[in-house]
Amino acid sequence: MTAALTPAHIFKVGFGFWEAKALLSAVELGLFTELAKGPADLHTLSRRLGLHERAARDFLDALVALKLLERKEGRYSNTAETEMFLDRAKPSYVGGLLDMANVRLYGSWGFLTEALKTGQNQNEGKETDDIFAALYADPERLRGFLAAMSGVSLGAAQAIAAKFPWANYKSFADIGTAQGMVPVTIARAHPHLSGAGYDLPQVKPILEEFAAKHGLSARIKFLPGNFFTDPLPAADVLIMGHILHDWDLAQKRMLLAKAHAALPKGGALIVYEALIDDDRRENAFGLLMSLNMLIETKGGFDFTGTDCQGWMREAGFAQSRVEPLAGPDSMVVAIK
Amino acid sequence: MTAALTPAHIFKVGFGFWEAKALLSAVELGLFTELAKGPADLHTLSRRLGLHERAARDFLDALVALKLLERKEGRYSNTAETEMFLDRAKPSYVGGLLDMANVRLYGSWGFLTEALKTGQNQNEGKETDDIFAALYADPERLRGFLAAMSGVSLGAAQAIAAKFPWANYKSFADIGTAQGMVPVTIARAHPHLSGAGYDLPQVKPILEEFAAKHGLSARIKFLPGNFFTDPLPAADVLIMGHILHDWDLAQKRMLLAKAHAALPKGGALIVYEALIDDDRRENAFGLLMSLNMLIETKGGFDFTGTDCQGWMREAGFAQSRVEPLAGPDSMVVAIK
């Protein structure tokens, strides 16, 4: 047994930051957007992206080996996935999340050990009480953050549009809607629905622009509000995606109680997150996301479906169920 | 086809720094060394390692999900691999390399985009001509670096000991030997051999201590030298592991020529590295290692087996062959 052991898995995980940073820099440099215009050779790509000749070939071939580029007869091109998801010109772009990882999270995670010892967040909001107040105060950073949230919610939005029994409902509101990826995706799939995106007032022009771009201005309204100080909007279905994990337990309970108060009898609350599996031993992304909340927020943490169902029961919901969505995301559906 | 595409692979690679940093912090905190003493529950481990209660459970369960820890009935323990390779008390410890990644490389890689644009190294030696001069000048950092090199060469050393026809030779010298992992591993496997470790004079006490610990002081000598200004030592077999990739092409050629000059006719040179596959599209680790040389050194780069065989031919070697070793490493064997 001993003879067969190798440190390969340990090194693969431990040097994962090399792979990650190669991709994050490629997104930063606009590589995939450039290649969406057509395949290009080493010399042409280097010139267009400003890559130094010492670095360019290893960088591009590393991305080939990571299955993020293709190379045929000396010309590089996108894979089907990078063409679809990392071309800034396409609505399916998810690179905003990687931009955020590159600009903010990579550096903050360098302080993970300190966070583990102190329980304190380690981002640029270290000295402020509220990372979101800082983000929302700066229009440029707000746009970047909201675009990142679209990247993280696209797959879940499509799955919620497909799996939830929308035929039984007429209206919905997405709480903490960001750009509006979730209401846009659901409204496109279900023409009978009218939807709303609820977020802080600064988000209004961003959501309205996003809804208009998808021809959905008539069916998706922006509702301004602060879910700590205001009630939640009334609708048949309320959705909270990647919202609860930002906050501590008392705040989570308060938000669930407000959702219960805003819904009609028979109304539904959909909470979706990278839910940790109940046994806390499978969904590494969900557990690491919880460490990301440690690094990014004052009291946030991720949770299991069973955790969430317990809090929903306490908030007065009559029944609930957990369903997997896309990738690491699952939803908890609760009925009032 | 379009409907089946998901950004899962993109996110898996792009957030690889979360997984990596969780492991690097675990090594930094001594988690695996602690668990090598016996399984422990959340409370006990948190107290011993100084983990904050907000962070501890998610951190440990994330490592379970990453297959780096086990958890049974609430007690955490090492996996077979982390027990073998990440307990500081064992000679098979490879965590020195991860310590180096944690303390130096993670931060330097944050500047990858700048390195790609400028071709300039981005480490703490940015303003110095020679990263190795800086490392070797500081005894504490030197010990850390040399231990890290043992971590990266253990698997290759075992494979070279097993695969090379040592019965045909009597003596060998390892050029740039660091702690001496390669000569110790080979000498233990082949009692008829006498070996030497060649490195800068500062390495003498470190190699001699390592050889003595393995009871090999009689068969492994330390040979002081600087391979830029001194000739290489005479021996039937010379070994250069993870040495050539540190240097630019002219320096690589000079080192190969010196090896040729030092060998007897029929003598062998073994070069081992994380060789890039000849088509430059499979060995992601080798290509990323080359980007690591971009970040760490003034002119270093990794290379393919065919690249190396060409330089060996130019240096006068009569024949050469490439053989895979362990993990991403391969060796090129050249005969004078």
Image (cartoon, coloured by chain):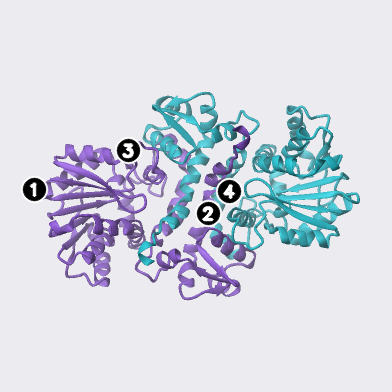
Chain colours: A purple, B cyan
Amino acid type, callout 2: Glu
- Return the chain for callout 2: A
Which residue extends farthest left?
A: A265
State yes or no: discs 3 and 2 in contact (Cβ < 8 Å).
no
Whether marks 2 and 1 lie on the same chain? yes
Instruction: Write down the residue under mark 4.
Output: B105
Going 82% across and 63% down the picture, which residue do you hit? B314
Pointer 3: residues within 10 angstroms few (<14), some, or many (20+)?
Answer: few
Res A41 quadrant in image? bottom right
Question: Measured from the top left, where is residue A124 in percent x and y?
Answer: 41, 50
Closest to the camera, between mark 1 and mark 3, is 3
Front position in the image: B141 or B244? B244
Question: Disc 3 residue type?
Answer: Asp
Quarter residue B175 falls in = top right
Measure the C-alpha gap from mark 1 to mark 4: 56 Å
Residue A120 vs residue B1, the one in the foreground:
B1
What's the mark number on residue A278?
3
Q: Residues within 10 Å of mark 1 (few under 14, many from 20)?
A: few
Chain containing the residue with disc 4: B
Q: Which residue carries the number 1 mark? A: A265
